[in-house]
Image (cartoon, helix red, strand yellow):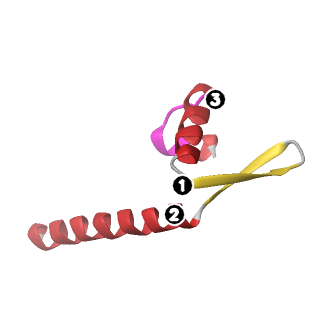
Amino acid sequence: MARIVGDRKKTVLTPGTIYPALKRLRKQKLIQYKRKGRKKVYFLTDIGNKELQALYSVFSEFFSGLKTKIK
């Protein structure tokens, strides 16, 4: 995850950046994790999925509106 996000932002994400963000998302009940051996596998909760869909709708609506003004 750190590599993928870091590649998109063209930077290196450190554990000091990632773990506090994951902790905040867990406190907000947007994500959970399950242990697989020594690793933690994070996934969206139902609340997280609903929030993602709501944000996606806002994002899509905003850029759809811009698209009509650019033409």
What separation in Å lies between label 1 and label 3 (alpha carbons)? 20 Å
Q: Which comes sooner in the sequence, label 2 or label 3? A: 3
Secondary structure type for disc 3: helix
Tell which of 47 and 40 is nearer to you.
Answer: 47
Mark 2 Cα-neighbour bin, 10 Å: few <14, some 14–19, many ≥20: few
Location of residue 13 by image quarter: top right
- Residue 65, relative to residue 18: is it above or below? below
Q: Is residue 3 magenta?
A: no
The residue identified by callout 3 is 15
The residue identified by callout 2 is 47
- Residue at image location 87% in from the left, 42% down from the top: 38
* Region in magenta: 5-15
Mark 3 Cα-neighbour bin, 10 Å: few <14, some 14–19, many ≥20: few
The residue identified by callout 1 is 30
Tell which of 32 and 55 is nearer to you.
Answer: 32
- Residue at image location 24% in from the left, 65% down from the top: 63
- Residue at image location 51% in from the left, 48% down from the top: 28
Give percent across and percent down for residue 52.
45, 63
Tell which of 18 and 13 is nearer to you.
Answer: 18
What separation in Å lies between label 1 and label 2 (alpha carbons)? 6 Å
* Proximity of marks 1 and 2: CB atoms separated by less than 8 Å: yes
